[in-house]
Amino acid sequence: MRPLRIALTKGRLEQKTISLLEAVGYDCSAVRDKGRKLILPVGNGKLEAVLAKAADVITYVEHGVCDLGVVGKDTILEYGGGFYEVLDLGFGKCQFALAGPKGKDFFGGYAAKTIASKYPNVARNYFERKAMDVRIIKIEGSVELAPLLGLADAIVDIVETGTTLKENGLEVIEPICDISARLIVNSASMKLRKTEIEALVEQMERAKEEKRA
Ligand code: PRP
């Protein structure tokens, strides 16, 4: 049988996941010295790490070509999907928020507002819950630019330290929800490789608790 394959979101979440896997006792030196390689052995081949963009982690896990994945709750909320979300890994903490120009009354007036976001589904759901009719424009990054350039009245985006908002004259209008990294599992793998997956999840959970203590 092939090793369990875990898709990691490249970048910050990848680094934190590697630290956690090392705390479990897995040798992650191949991932640390990866160069441009995208599939790497972990724990002397017990696991296989696949490095992907956040939304693709979901795609690979949904299609079952990766058994597990580590991805932010932001991506899960935006892309949804048919998989199990088994563990809040406790890192990659930030929040979704509605933000706009400092001191401006976003909720005042009757004209429909324009919202820029990298997460149009999250933005749509948020305004639907408020029964507010808005126009949503998808932006790929540095969403803070949209209200500065006059394209949008506000943004729905991730806020971590708040520095990007502050340095661009913006502020949180309303927090939407908390975000952190999650461990997800393909539904078929969960049945077919239950024992191995449960053992790994348990190990990762224990390592997470020990790191916190
Ligand atoms: C995210 C987010 C904000 C920023 C928030 O962007 O979209 O722009 O981080 O962080 P802060 O509150 O600590 O300033 P990211 O760095 O992922 O790049 P992007 O805007 O190109 O998506």
Image (spheres, rainbow, N blue to C red):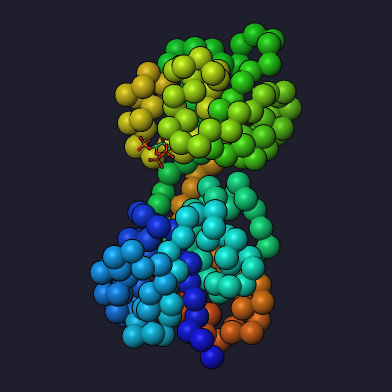
Kindly identify the residue that appears in the image at 54 percent across and 50 percent down: 75
Residue 200 in view, yes or no = yes
- On screen, 49 above or below 173? below
Kindly identify the residue that appears in the image at 49 percent across and 23 percent down: 146
Kindly identify the residue that appears in the image at 43 percent across and 77 percent down: 48
Quadrant of the displayed image that contains ligand 1: top left
The picture places residue 175, in percent across and down from the top left corner, at 51, 33
Kindly identify the residue that appears in the image at 63 percent across and 65 percent down: 62
The picture places residue 203, in percent across and down from the top left corner, at 42, 77
In the image, 87 versus 150, the foreground residue is: 150
Q: Quadrant of the N terminus?
A: bottom right
The residue sitting at the top extreme is 109
The residue sitting at the bottom extreme is 1
Q: Quadrant of the C terminus?
A: bottom left
- On screen, 168 above or below 48? above
Left or right: 21 as drawn, with respect to 77: left
The picture places residue 121, in percent across and down from the top left corner, at 65, 40
The picture places residue 103, in percent across and down from the top left corner, at 45, 12
